[in-house]
């Protein structure tokens, strides 16, 4: 479901073989993402490459993960958001809540600023 790798001290989580982030997979994804913040000051990127649809439970995972990151002095960012999903971020007025970047490289570089 999720593949993680460490790039320059940043944990990058990417979906494998998924094009929808919906209620079917949200609970295990949420638990896995939140588990990374057991260490304080964790830097985590969720790479949405290939995801064409996110339902309300998926957006709940984004919010829950951000809250966990903030409570543990961590950082949570999102990258490679499809146009369709970005429209949902804007509709829900969450595009200004999350740090969203066009590419993975740009997202990882943003941690250095």
Image (cartoon, rainbow, N blue to C red):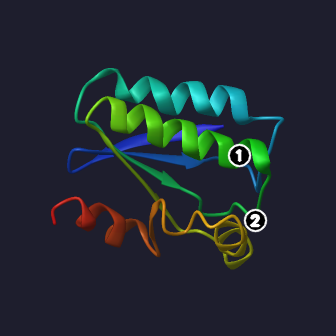
**Dividing the picture into quarters, in which one does residue 74 lie?**
top left
- The spot of residue 32 in percent (x, y) is 53, 27
Q: Quadrant of the N terminus?
A: top right
Question: What residue lies at 38% left-to-right and 37% top-to-bottom?
Answer: 69
Secondary structure of the residue carrying tag 2 is loop
- The spot of residue 92 in percent (x, y) is 69, 64
- The spot of residue 94 in percent (x, y) is 58, 63
Question: What residue lies at 39% left-to-right and 28% top-to-bottom?
Answer: 36
Residue 8 horizontal side relative to residue 68, left or right: left
**Dividing the picture into quarters, in which one does residue 81 lie?**
bottom right
Q: Residue furthest left?
A: 112
Q: Residue furthest front?
A: 93
Spatial separation of the CA atoms under disc 1 and disc 2? 12 Å
Secondary structure of the residue carrying tag 1 is helix
When the figure is inspected, residue 43 is found, relative to residue 111, above or below; the finding is: above
**Dividing the picture into quarters, in which one does residue 107 lie?**
bottom left
The residue to which callout 1 is attached is: 58
When the figure is inspected, residue 111 is found, relative to residue 65, above or below; the finding is: below
Mark 1 and mark 2 lie on one chain; the one further toward the N terminus is: 2
């Amino acid at each position: 479901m999720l593949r993680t790798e460490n790039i320059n001290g940043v944990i990058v989580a990417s979906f494998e073989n998924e094009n929808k982030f919906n209620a079917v997979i949200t609970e295990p994804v949420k638990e896995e993402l939140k588990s990374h913040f057991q260490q304080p000051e964790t830097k985590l990127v969720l790479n949405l490459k290939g995801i064409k649809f996110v339902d309300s439970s998926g957006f709940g995972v984004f919010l829950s993960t951000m809250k966990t990151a903030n409570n543990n002095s961590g950082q949570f960012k999102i990258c490679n958001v499809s146009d369709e999903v970005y429209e949902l971020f804007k509709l829900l007025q969450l595009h200004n809540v999350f740090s969203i970047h066009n590419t993975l490289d740009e997202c990882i570089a943003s941690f250095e600023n």
